[in-house]
Image (tube, rainbow, N blue to C red):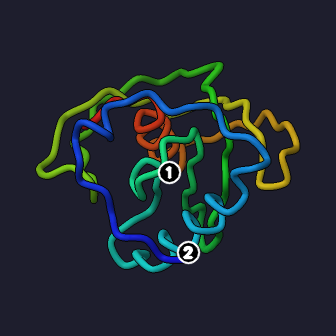
Amino acid sequence: MVHELNHDLGFLSQKAERATEDDKQVIADLLDTLRAHLDTCVGMAANMIGVNKSIIVFCKGTKQLVMVNPVIVKKTGQYFVEETCLSVPGSKKTVRYNDIEVVYLDENFTRKRTKYTGFTAQIIQHEIDHTNGILI
């Protein structure tokens, strides 16, 4: 189900709760909402659709991938970039890392540890910031 985007800065500033297998519908809704916004969006966190759970979805090429309870465990190659967000007006200069390693659960709740680089790594960092209540 496609959801309206949440613009409530108070809600978006909250640290997300850990997701469980009971949150599978949130994953489906988040993917549906990302797909409805592919013309202007490459990633979303659950709080962007009004659900305070640690779930993100993002584009990697033509695929949309899911991370549940993601944690960045390694990062290298610091750089600065100006980012925008569908839920927050304006843009902000922020620190990102070119190479990251993330521990997470996939959409089947299987534990993964994966390395990402470049723009995909940047998207993931932005969305994980959302789960930590950090707004750009």
The answer to whether 95 is drawn above or below residue 42 in the figure is above
The answer to whether 9 is drawn above or below residue 17 in the figure is below
User: Which residue appears farthest toward the left when viewing the image?
Assistant: 90
Q: Position of residue 71 (x, y in %)?
A: 63, 27
User: Which residue appears farthest toward the front when viewing the image?
Assistant: 22
Residue drawn at point x = 47 percent, y = 57 percent: 43
Residue type at mark 2 is Asp
Q: Which mark is residue 79?
A: none
Residue type at mark 1 is Ala
Residue drawn at point x = 77 percent, y = 41 percent: 105
The answer to whether 61 is drawn above or below residue 72 in the figure is below
38 horizontally vs 73: left or right: left
Q: Position of residue 3 (x, y in %)?
A: 43, 71
Residue drawn at point x = 41 percent, y = 23 percent: 78
* Secondary structure category for the residue under label 2: helix
56 horizontally vs 106: left or right: left
Q: Residues within 10 Å of mark 1 (few under 14, many from 20)?
A: many
* Secondary structure category for the residue under label 1: helix
Q: Residues within 10 Å of mark 2 (few under 14, many from 20)?
A: some
Q: Position of residue 129 (x, y in %)?
A: 42, 33
Looking at the rendered image, the quarter that the C terminus falls into is top left
Residue drawn at point x = 33 percent, y = 63 percent: 5
Q: Nearer the viewer, residue 87 or 18?
A: 18
Q: Nearer the viewer, residue 78 or 7?
A: 7
65 horizontally vs 131: left or right: right
Q: Which mark is residue 32?
A: 2
Looking at the rendered image, the quarter that the N terminus falls into is bottom right
Q: Position of residue 127 (x, y in %)?
A: 46, 43
**Residue receiving disc 1:** 46
Q: How many marks?
A: 2
* Res 112 → quadrant: top right
